[in-house]
Image: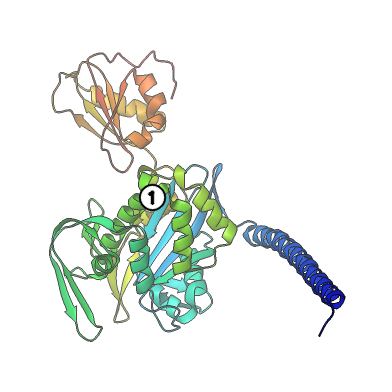
Amino acid sequence: MLSEEEVVRRKAELEERRNLKRAYRRRQIVIYSLCFFVGIILMVFTARYTYQRSVEGTPVMTGNSQRLLVLFLGTDEKLEASTRADSIMLFSLDTTTGEAGVLSIPRDTRVWVPSRQRWERINAAYAHGGASMAMEAVSHLLGVPVDYYVHTDFDGFEQLVDVLGGVEINVARKMHYVDHAQGLEINLQPGLQILSGEKALQYVRYRDRLGDVSLVDPFNEEYDGRVERQRQFFEAIISQALSPSSLIKLPQLVTQTFRIVNTNLPWERVFSLALSGSKFSADKIQTAVLPGNSQVLNDAWYWVVNEQKAKAIIDSVVLGKPEPLRLVVLNGNGRSGIAQEVSDLLRYYGYDVISHGNAEHFNFVTTQVVVSARDAERVKPLAEYLGASIQEADQENAQVTVIIGKDYTSTNDRSVGI
């Protein structure tokens, strides 16, 4: 049996060993913490260096702004080599101004693929070479460098919509389709409704007699079909994502989103987009379908791009360049020949006057320049020169309507200010 002195001594030894273990553990924690924080610092500097090297010369410059171009690819199966892209859209983002564009590219678009040295459908380019070949083909097609992509499959798409709490869509007509081979059943009723991820996927996958895309009104450049519905859906989902309730939790939404998708966007870019989310709004976003028409070439159907019309769309939606103003001059005071006189004058000073004629009546007291809200600033010099007021209206395609009122005086002695 141990004596009292031995018991005390052993207790002291045991306590000393415990103190040594605690001290050792504290040293381990300090060392591991230092290693962790040093690793984080090194990772940040390495990532920043790699990021700066990788994006050098990448942003598309349009005047004084920079646009980040990101190709969105939606497929039915994730990362399958033989899978063809079902949805293809190019997102153009200016994080400084909050302006953005979304260009829908029909999946049957005929493109030249440099690495294969042959013509392909754009979705076939993705099937042969994944996102990198799709970016290569889109870059060649549009004449702009596309270096980043975001890819998701059907499951990811459903999760994206559910993360946002659903998306409000006005379903124009009943959509019903059953494909037992694909295990696909679409059943949507018409009307304004909030679509869950599952229902939203049905909406963007539905194909009617118009197929993927169809030019239904060549005169007004109106398209219909699945690609047009997808464009409208993405307008709605962007509006939902930029709503005040969503902006509050945007960093969280971005984090969740990038867990769902596959992308080569550097994390610094993602973080920057999350922080600048409040700058974007639905009225600053332009959307369009890549203009063209369906044609049969070598016994195969393609969407063949109209290069002349595509250039204007690319300049506006992708590069953020303002559309050239197109003027319609109307006689609103009844003075004979006044619309022709003003049209000739404005053409002389470089304006594109597409037509002139009579207004709905000749009792306009003041001269007016009618323009969309987004172009109001651009027409101020014109309005000042004509002594006109600016009226904002729902004008499309950068069209400006000049109505000559009774207050308009002869332009012969005017000083040129436009």
The C terminus - image quarter: top left
Res 352 seen here = no
Image quadrant in which you'd find residue 197 = bottom left
Q: Residue at x 24, y 69 (%)?
A: 202
**Label 1 residue SS:** helix
Image quarter hosting the N terminus = bottom right
- For residue 115, side relative to residue 260 (left or right): right
The residue under the point 53% across, 57% down is 270
Side of 206 where 40 appears, left or right? right
The residue indicated by pointer 1 is 246
Q: Residues within 10 Å of mark 1 (few under 14, many from 20)?
A: some
Residue 182 in percent (x, y) is at 25, 83
Q: Up-down: is 359 above or below 2?
A: above
Q: Is residue 203 left or right of residue 7?
A: left
Determine whether, in the image, residue 33 is placed left or right of residue 74.
Answer: right
Give percent across and percent down for residue 107: 35, 71
Q: Position of residue 45 (x, y in %)?
A: 71, 59
Q: Amino acid at mark 1?
A: Ser
Q: Quadrant of residue 72?
A: bottom left
- The way the protein has been coloured in the rendering is rainbow
Residue 71 picture location, percent across and down = 46, 63
